[in-house]
Structure formats: C-alpha cells, structure tokens
Amino acid sequence: MPRARDKGLGLPLATFLVYAYLYAPIAVLAVFSFNRSRLSTHWAGFTSEWYATLWRDEQICQGLVNSLVVAGVVTLACVAFGTLGALVFGRGRGRGRSLLEGLVYLPLVIPEIVMAVALVIFFSLLRMQLTLRTVIAAHIAFCISYAIIVVGARLAGTDRAIEEAALDLGASEWATFFRVTLPLAAPAILSSALLIFTTSFDDYLITSFVSGVGSTTLPLEIYSRLIRGITPEINAVSTAILAATIPLVIVAQRLERGAMRVKTALASVGAVLLVMVLPMLAKTWPAGRPTPELNIYTWSTYVSPRILRGFEREFHCKVNYDLYDSNEALLAKLQAGNVGYDLVIPSDYMVEILLGQRLLARLDKSRLPNVWANVDARFLNLPFDPHNDYSVPYAWGTTGLAYRADLVGEKVESWSALFDPRFAGHILLLDDMREVFGMALKQLGASLNSTNPEEIRQARDLLLRQKPLVKGYNSSNFEQDLVAGDAWLAQAFNGNMTFALRDEPRLRYVVPKEGGTVSVDCACIPLHAPHKDLAMEFINYFHRPEVASAFINDCGFNTPNLRAPARVEPWLLAEPSVFPDPAWLGRCEFMRDLGPVVALYDRYWTEIKAR
Amino acid sequence: MEHVIQFFRRRPVLRAASLLAGSLVWLVGFFLVPLAYLLTVSFAHRSPYGTIEWTFGLGNYSRAFQPLYLEIYWRSFWMALVTTSVCAVLGYPVAYTIALRASPRLRSTLLNTPSAVFIGLVYGELPFMILPIYAVLQKFDRSLLEAAQDLGAGRWRTFFRVTLPLSAPGFAAGAVLVFISSVGAFITPDLLGGARTMMVGNLIQNQFALVRDQPFGSAVAFLLTAVVLLMLLTGLRRAQRVTREMF
C-alpha cells in the first residue's frame, strides 16, 4: 500500500535526469572520438583515424604505460599492507584504537592540495629525485587508507567464531589465515583494489606536484593537451579507457552480488589488464640495450617532433620532454630540487636568476662549434651571461599586441587598447607576471625593469582597474581565442601568432608604440643534469642551419641562427611575428633580473589574480 | 613458521605493530612527517629568490588574514557550499530511488561501490553525495513510513517529517565529503575560469609553482587543513561512521 501511495513524486524521472547528466557527456565524448572533423563542434562523418593516431602517439602511450605501472604497483602495495593493517584495524580494540583511526581517516579528509604541497616540499627536503618512484610513494600514502578501511569493515563484520572453529579443529594459525580469513576478506580486498586502482590511475593533483621528467602519467598528459584545446585524440584515449573499464565494472558487480567466484573475477581482471598492458609494453619496451635519454624541459610552443626524432636517430637516444608556459614555472621546478632535466630553455632574465642561485652547469664551449659559427654576434655575450659560459641563445622573440582588425574596428598601435572599456570581456593577458607588469609599466611610460616601488604600485593599481575588462590570463593558446573571435585583443608572444596570422587574415600583430619586450631564450644545462654530454650535443645539433630553420618552419619563432633564414619557407620571411620590423625592436627592452624587489611584484601579482 | 606464530601470539602488541608496520611506514613517513614539515615551513620566511629562510615568526599567518585573502577564502567557501547544495539536491532523489524504490536487481545495476567509482572517475563530486545518503536510506525502516501514514500524515508530510530528517546523517557525511574536495579544487577554476578567478586551491598552488613563497603557501594550506578538521570534529563525527558504512 505505501509503495503505491508514494508513486508520482516524479522520482524515477529525476533519477533518470541525473544519470543522463552524468552519462550524456561521456556518450558525446565517445561519439566524437569517431568524428572525421578535428573541431569537436560538428559531425563530419565516421572515422577511426584518431585511434590510429593515438597508437602512433608516443607521449600518450608512454603516459598510459606510466599510469598503469603506477596504479598497478600502488594497488598491490596498498592491498598487501592494507590487508595486514586491517587485521588489527578491523578487529583491534584498546587504547591506540582512536589514534590509529584518526591516522587512517586523515588522508581521506584532508584537502588533496595540502597533501600535494606537503609531499613536494618533503621530497625536496630529502633531495629525492622526482621520478615514478616518488609518484608511487605519494599514491600509496593517499590510497592505503581505502584498503585498511574497506577490508577492516569486512573483517569487523565477519564472525570470529569461524576462525576460532578452524583453530580448534587443529588448523595452524597460518593455515587459518590463508584458508579462512583471506577467503572471507577476498571480496573486500578485490573491491578495495579496484577502488585504489581507479583512484591512483585517475589522480592529477598530487601527481602533478610529485612527478618529474619521464614520469608523466596519462592524466597529466591529457591535461597538458587540454589547456591547448580539446582534440579528437583526447576523446579517443578517453573512450578507449572507458571501454577497458566496463569489463572491470561488470566483474565488480557480479562479485558483489556473489554471482562470480573470486578466482574467476581475478582471472578476468587479469585478462583485461593483460590485453591493455601487453601491446603497450611491447610498443614502449626499449629495444635491445638501454638507450641513453635526454630530458628536455622547454616552452610548450618550442616542440618540433621532427627535430627531436632526427636527434634520436642520429645519436641513438631517446628524447623526453616536459613543457612549461612561464619562466617562473621553470624556476619553481628547478628550485623544487632534483628533477632530472638535462636541458632547459629559460629567457634572458631567468638565466640571470638561475645563475644567481647556482642552478646551472658551465658549458664546454669547445663542443659547440655550430653555435660560434652560425649564431648572430648581436645575441652573444649579453649582459646576463657576459661570456656565454652558462647559456647559449636558442630562440628570440618579442611580446606585443595581437588583435582582430575586424572586431576592434580600428588600427591599434598602443597598449591603451587593452584598457579600453569598449573591448571589455574580449581582452586576454598573458598568464605571466613579468610580462603583464612590463606592459602596465610601459603604458605608464616607465621601464619594464622598474625597481621603483612607487612605479610598481602604480602599475598594480592600473592592472587592478583593468581587471574587470579582462576575459582571462592565458600564455598557452590565446591565439585560438583570437581566431575563434572570443577574444578581440591579446597580449601575445610573437611566435604563438605566426600560424594564426597565416590562417586568419583579419588578425594583426604589433609591438605597440610604448614598447614591448624583446627576449632571448637560451639553452642551459641544470647543475645536476644526469646527461650533460647529450645535452651539449643537442645544443650543437640545434644550431645546424637545417635544424634551426626547421625550428622556424615548425614553431613559428625565430632563432638567432644567421644561416637559418635561407631555408625558411618564404611566407614566414614576410611575417612580422617572426621577422619583425627593425623599428619595433628599437622600442623594445630586454627584461633584467630585478633582485629583491621581485618579491613585491610577486605579491602584487597574487593580489591582482586574487580579485 | 610455528615458532614465529607462537612468538607473536604471546606478544599481542608486537603482533599488532608488525601487522601494521607497512601501513604505518606510509601513513607516518609519507603523510604525517611531510605534514609536520609543512607546519614548520609555514613559520619560516621566503628569501627574495624564493628559497626558504629559516627565521621563524607568525608573519605568514598574519598575512593570510589580510582582507584580500579573506576574500579568496570566502569565495572558495561559497563555491564549495553551492557545489555541495547542488549535489544534495541532485543526489538525494537518486539515492532515494535506489535505496527505497528500485527493485533489488535494478539497484545492483544502478549502484554499488565499484560502479559508483566508475561514475566518480568521470564526474567527481556527485557520487560522494549519493553514496552516504544511500548508505543511510538503505538501513531505513520502512515501517516508519507506514506508521506515519497510518497516523494520517500525507505523502509530503511523511517525507518532510520522517524520511528527510532521518536522511540527515547521510546528508552531513555527503556534505563533508563534497565540501572538502571542492574547497581545495584548483584545476576546474584554472581550466574553466580562464585563470581569472582565484580560489584557495589556486592560491596555494601558485605559491608553490609560480611565486615560490613556500612558507606563505604552507601557512594557507595549514589553515585550510585546520578549518576542515575543525568542521569534522565539531558535530560531524557521524560523517565518519556513515562513510565507514558506505564501503
């Protein structure tokens, strides 16, 4: 009777809607992974091409293998330690109990970001190199509680009398554990294993703090691509993982209902994992003797796959790379301790800072003949490293203003357009402290290297007043927003604009009349780099004319290599973002290390971002 | 082997300790100790170049209470609260339907721990609200509903006076779980907010990854932890109990 009466609350409908809300985006994602068009907005016919692309994509395959290794090791360790712990936790009583309970629950309730920062400063205190090992250690720390709690709850719910009966009947304690206790706990062990596997496999936040070079997991790889825009490959990899998850979920459900024996369940989970892991391992397993590795940490816009592949082939090594979008992110990573990078590409002022902190290794100049033969002398012996003992120019560029002539409706030649209320909500700034302050200081008529607290304060006030007009802070893919027409004006790194300018004729790039930044990004070797020789070879290789020109052709940034332009595609020579008007350079300034006053910038930057 | 077992049988404390050893190494070595170090750093200072200067003081904490930062906490708190409320409104009908209305067969297809993990893998917070409410409602005594209706209460009255109050512990547990994980979030604001809206998660992350003021970042992180723990200890202890039943 009551069942009949409470019908009609619309509950089934509401439940259906919530489930639709949860699952519809996943369905869309799966469908669009078969979409022929690269843009994820409209359907252009069926293709399985993206899955093939995925298979060839070494970064994604390596990320997947890393994730599976981490999740696998973490699951085994947590289940082993956790089950033993659960024997005490699930059944123990006594004084230590509530203390232990607190310790076990704390990792589950503490905000993940707190755990992440605690671990990263701890690892840096111990000078531990950030590798897959640190990722695994961190994951075990936040997953082990699941095993202790889940298995503990199951053991607490089982009847001790069964085990006592076994002991009374003459079974040894050892046999009782393996023949009675473990089978009783098995469903909970397996269920906690699945929970831990998915939690570890999925983790982004903590991993992003404690991973170093070569330990990029799949979520990290996906995220680093996502901030540059959604691609069909991302849809495809997500769908593939989804497909692999479904059998696991079915197994777990049948296990829970008691419709499947633990052994069968284990066998099927094992089979699914093998099917997933084996081809990946076969693909990424280093062939023959271990090849030397070169770990590069570079700007997200400086990657040219054919340059890296060419180097790998010629020097019989493997090149790994990680990406950053600001000099400060690079500094933070190098300061965090032993990260294992062999080659980094900081800008001029950052070279000065890194030198001040003794984070760079001295270069062996005799091994860099291409540099001395081909690099424009104007870019050598600059004040931040007067004899190029620690740094070699790699690329150079300007920071200026990019805008959509059609949407703005007038010619823009001044930074003041970025402060114009008519363009409110369509203005993008770089997510880069020094560049944003530099722009504001230029607008005020000051130097972008101002160390005068009063001027810096005025720049802050200007930026605070401007904040309501700003759509966002973006250093990685602002050109896409300009092409799409969501943003009309953007503070821009020159090279990001190059291909956008070619594809969208209504886009413009200028260095405003107040002046902008000119920067030289330099190849440097961190002090504790494990593969200094290979890094030196890479710098020398990069300055071969054909490689330097490939960099311009692929990345849209210029290099100081004098012999590169001869081989550059003709349209690039006419592109002001690559080969700027000499008059522009006259109004540009190099950034310098500002010394202690940078703390003031840092603080004001936090204030501006915080509003 | 029997000797070992005999040895431990006579020393229960040692037995417990050795069984717990693996877990304790991690929970202490990679959790408590780093947390203690974080606390220590939060009293230190930042050198101009962003390294840690070991001079101790309360400067970071007094800075953390400046109006600017209070605004960020307030924003994070507010957003987490809204997220929690939306999850509660969306999650309740689902938990209710699964626990009280669905046939057992349908129930096991819609929800059990692993499939909830599956949803969670993709969708973050909502399952953390649904699961605890479900755990509470599952144990709910249906005869209470019948009693209320026999005593003349209407359908809505029964719901508001009986079912809903009895779901309160589930709500509390769900709210704590959702609130904690959303208050420290920083990826979503970065990805969807154009790096324009700062939340406390971003504030902490920036101090470590960009501005390199680790002592100040540690202080904010510790304050966040303190608030969360305080929330848990004051009257939300039952959240823990429900969470335990959830698994």
Image (spheres, rainbow, N blue to C red):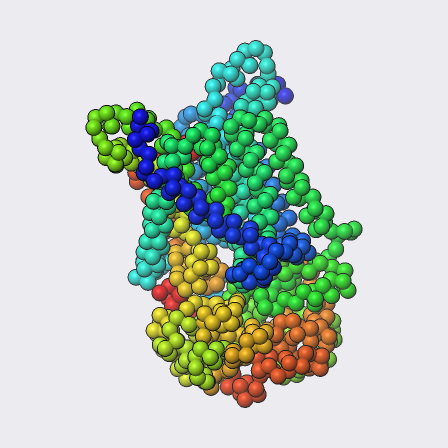
In the picture provided, is A287 more to the left or to the right than A433? right
Look at 64% across and 36% down and name the residue there. A270
- Viewer-nearest residue: A508 or A525: A508
Where residue A51 sits in the image (x, y, percent)? 64, 53
Is the residue B242 above or below the residue A292 in the image?
A: above
Quadrant location, the N terminus of chain B = top right
Residue A81 visible in this rendered orientation of the protein: no
- Viewer-nearest residue: A221 or A235: A235
Residue A578 visible in this rendered orientation of the protein: yes
Is the residue A596 above or below the residue B236 in the image?
A: below
Where residue A152 sits in the image (x, y, percent)? 48, 29
- Viewer-nearest residue: A214 or A44: A44
Look at 61% across and 55% down and name the residue there. A46
Where residue A134 sits in the image (x, y, percent)? 57, 48
Look at 53% across and 86% down and name the residue there. A584
In the picture provided, is A515 more to the left or to the right than A57? left
Is the residue A68 above or below the residue B150 in the image?
A: below
* Name of the residue lying farthest toward the left: B152
Where residue B130 sits in the image (x, y, percent)? 40, 40
* Name of the residue lying farthest toward the right: A288
Quadrant location, the C terminus of chain B = top left
* Name of the residue lying farthest toward the top: A169
